[in-house]
Amino acid sequence: MRFRLATLTLACALVACAPASAAPADPLGHAGRWITDATGRVVILHGLNVVAKRPPYAPDALGFGADDAAFLARNGFGVVRLGLMWSAVEPHPGVYDDAYLDRIARTQRLLARAGIWSQLDFHQDAYNERFGGQGMPDWATLDDGLPSDPGYPVAQFFSLGNIRAWDNFWANSRDSGGVGLQDRYAAAWRHVAARFAGVDHVIGYDLLNEPWPGTSWPLCANTAVCPQHQQLAAFYRKVIAAVRQVDRSHIAWYEPNLLTAAGAAVDLPKLGDSRAGLSFHVYCLTAALGGGNDSPALCPGLEQVAFDQAESHSAASGSALLMTEFGSTNDTAAIRRVAAEADRNRVGWTEWTYSSNGRTDFAGTPSLVHDPDKPPAGANVDAGQRGALLRVAPRVVAGTPADWSYDPATKVFRMRWSSARAGGGGRFGAGAISEVTVPEDLYPGGYAAAVAGGTVVSARRSTVLKIAGGARSVSLVLRPGAGGAFPRERVASFSARVVPKRDARRPYRFSVSGRVGLPEGVRTADGCAGAVRVRIGRAKAGRARVRPDCTWRLRVLRRRAGRAKAAARFAGNAVLGPSMVRRFALRAGT
């Protein structure tokens, strides 16, 4: 072990193992079941759904903003399933609302600035508002005049109008302009994809949320082979072909019908696209039917069936995997359980949902933040939901994950991975960076990281634990407490400026100020500390403490006239180093 660590240290010195560039690199693709970044490292995403289910169907209109994005990032979440509605994209046949897409794009950009990825989701529930849901336009709701009752959440099962609307959609029935509904849908996706093609921090397009079989739903619920799956596959091929006309890079995510969330078979064939992924949901049967109840004895087995079905489909199709819905319950034990099941099955996730106030979702839906129009703090954050979702998790892995787990009771995280590239093609070399997100609130007293086969290269108490690999296999155990080999991390930036640059009246007064820039993962409570020393010429001018917001300021009184060279030096602190110097000049007198 000593020889391995010495070899790793030398290798890192030779290749300059700098952790600052270790975040997932665009564009994201996949190697079989694994999402990968541009360097081939496996990317594990954890986050929430942000879907506005009420007009104007845009999260920003309902209050979601930069403070919400910062809140998500601060709590270790790296992805948002960002909902948009076909009815808002194409309010009239063949007429697209680009102002609506502008709003969605602004939300995607502010998420990207916070380091959060977006999956763009054409969302629907129960087809249309006529049946108590939303998503599909009125002009595309061909129910042939059949009754709409009962409404959501059981409309798909029992509303004759809802079932007929789905049947007409799957039959590609023509709208008033003589164009097939699926053809309109595919063209709308092409329009959206053209807008987001080449955009950073987009993991792809979720083509249709929870498709419903229509008349054939009883067969899909009770047999291993759903007759609607071939019909659904043909639809996805049509939509993917339209998307690929304008965007050949982003992953096309497709969903099986809603019943698979409760364990029905995922019997979709290969879709013939090399950049495709399965977006699947996991709800215990009673929750899927809208009961909201949980059975600790029954649900774990049913939920594992859903994971098994997704894994089996991925093995047969080569598609990536992402669980894009679970939760939607006040039972925080159930949320923790499914999150742990996702860990055991090595799958990333987006939980339902970020916010629900009767304007963003159906009234009473459990959520992390009650009202996005208010700051995500205090009583506006559901402490139970946050506690259930907050966990240590891998973010990017230079190799192939073998397993990982987090115990909320002991706050112990364990993970193992090999340096072999996912999907084959050799191994990552010594110094390749893997990352684990460590939400700061989980370890107020700090954490210790024990690594075999690698070296920690991030600062003590960093919210992003970075490990430089070296051995063929690497293991990590992270637990509360001090200890472990944590280096000081390099300062991201250090600035110094003098005002005024020239003072003509004696005594000559100057103000020198600046800011210490923190690297990713270093908390302000740890990094915004220490002192800055200023020298003018050969003389010491004074010392300024770094404030909690990472700024510093020093007032300087100079009695001698003339031009002088000056320098400000930040010596670092317990987590930042080495020292950094910024030079400037000032002039006293005429």
Image: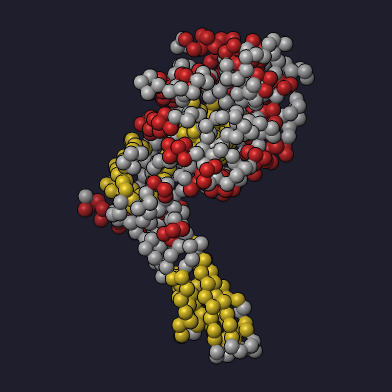
Q: Which coloring applies here? A: secondary structure
Between 406 and 444, the one nearer to me in the picture: 444
Q: Position of residue 368 (x, y in %)?
A: 51, 38
Q: Is residue 268 visible?
A: no
* Residue at x 49% of width, y 23% of height: 292
**Residue closest to the eye, 279 or 559:** 559
Up-down: is 231 above or below 531?
Answer: above
**In the rendered view, does 191 fall on the left or right side of 413?**
right
Query: Which quarter of the picture shows residue 128?
Result: top right
> Residue 11 appears at what percent x and percent y?
32, 55
In this view, 380 is above or below 494:
above
In this view, which residue lies farthest toward the left? Answer: 2
At 48% from the left and 81% from the top, the residue drawn is: 541
Residue 149 in percent (x, y) is at 65, 13
Residue at the extreme right of the image, as rendered? 177
Residue 76 to residue 175: above or below: below
Please indicate whether residue 383 sits to the left or right of residue 143 in the image. Answer: left
Would you identify the image quadrant in which residue 576 lies? bottom left
- Between 75 and 182, the one nearer to me in the picture: 75
Spot occupied by residue 361 in the image (x, y as percentages of width and height): 60, 31
* Count of labels in the image: 0
Quadrant where the C terminus sits is bottom right
**Residue 135, visible in the rendered structure:** yes
Instruction: Name the residue located 38 percent from the left edge and 61 percent from the top edge.
Output: 575
Q: Is residue 550 left or right of residue 338?
A: right
Given residues 37 and 465, the one toward you in this image is 465
Q: Is residue 414 left or right of residue 97?
A: left
In the image, residue 410 sits, relative to residue 258, either above or below, namely: below
Question: Which residue is located at x 54 percent, y 26 percent?
Answer: 254
